[in-house]
Amino acid sequence: MSLYRVVRAVAESSGDGPIDWTAAAEAAKAGTDPGSVNLTEAQRAGYAGDVRDARSRIREVAAVDFDLPDTVEVQHRHHWIDANVATFRRVMSPLENETGLVPGLARTVNTGTMGLMLGFLANNVLGQYDPLLLAEGDDHALYFVHPNIQRVTGLLDVDEERFRRWIAFHEVAHAAEFGSAPWLSTYLEDQMQAGIGALTEGRFDRDALHELNVAMTAVEGYAELVMDRAFDEEYDDLRRKLDERRQGQGPIAKLVRRLLGLGMKRRQYERGKEFFDRVADERGVHGASVVWEKAEYLPSDEELTHPEKWLARVPA
């Protein structure tokens, strides 16, 4: 880790766009210990087995047909930064055309902010299903950040193999959503582009961002439901200890999480899980999976609060 390299990368940011992505990635990596991905044979086999078992169990419990992404990687933190710089750049590409509105000082601030965000996330992400929004083609990817999984396992004082397997079930649940709903990536892309496009015009499209938030609440809630009901081991202590760790973080970490909207993401998990628990209790997990048949079956904001209205509207 080098504070000098972080500052130099940000100070030397250049280009005409609002963010110098190369400098942002360099700053993030300069401030982040990459960690190690020198896995034992047992660990390599463990990751592969967890993913295969999660796919099999989720297909059985949720009654959805899907395949795993072609790309399944065990990464260290710098690998994760490189993969996600490309994703962030695609998502924010509409802003790249607003070159005349972004002076050099603003570019430096934007680059530094993005570097800070990438570095913080790289130190905290455990696993990630990446639908590669706005990318050409239909490639999706699944990542596990091994150094973070090892570190958090030690902090929580839990069994590494069980914790790793639990994370795998959550990420493969996301693969099930996108794999069984070919329309979902396009739907999210449209909402995302509408919101960002409005910002480039000096407008705030509250409706587009609201619809995106509602859809992501469904995405995260369903993954939580499937993660819990398909997982083949005890998990209550894992969820409790992970929640306690989040709540016990220091003030700086809490501030960064708030600025990055991670508190909102946690609320998405909780609200979406409450909705799908109610639906699954009524119709089973396979009945909850009907939500991915078409976009019209996504719950509305009101239905997330009142699942009985969704149950009355959507056929079993």
Image (tube, grey):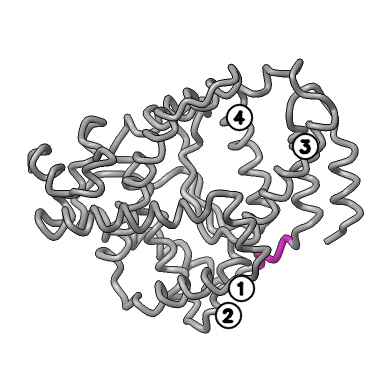
Residue 14 against residue 267 in the figure, above or below: above
Q: Earlier in the sequence, mark 4 or mark 3?
A: 3
Q: Quadrant of the C terminus?
A: top left
Q: Which residues are magenta?
A: 34-38
Q: Is residue 191 left or right of residue 41?
A: left
Residue linked to disc 1: 151
Of tags 4 and 3, the one toward the viewer is 4
Which residue: 17% across, 49% down? 307
- Given contact means CB atoms under 8 Å apart, are the residues at marks 4 and 1 in contact? no
User: 50 or 310, which lies in front?
Assistant: 310
> What's the distance in space between the residues labelled 4 and 1, CA to CA?
31 Å
> What's the distance in space between the residues labelled 1 and 2, CA to CA?
5 Å
Label 3, secondary structure: give it.
Answer: helix
- Amino acid marked by disc 2: Gly
Crowding near the residue tagged with mark 4, few <14, some 14–19, many ≥20 C-alpha atoms within 10 Å: some
Report x, y in % for residue 215.
35, 39
Prevailing secondary structure of the magenta residues: loop
Q: Quadrant of residue 167?
A: bottom left
Crowding near the residue tagged with mark 2, few <14, some 14–19, many ≥20 C-alpha atoms within 10 Å: few
Q: Earlier in the sequence, mark 2 or mark 3?
A: 3
Which residue: 61% across, 43% down? 84
Which mark is drawn over residue 92? 4
Residue linked to disc 2: 154
Give the number of marks.
4
Residue linked to disc 3: 22
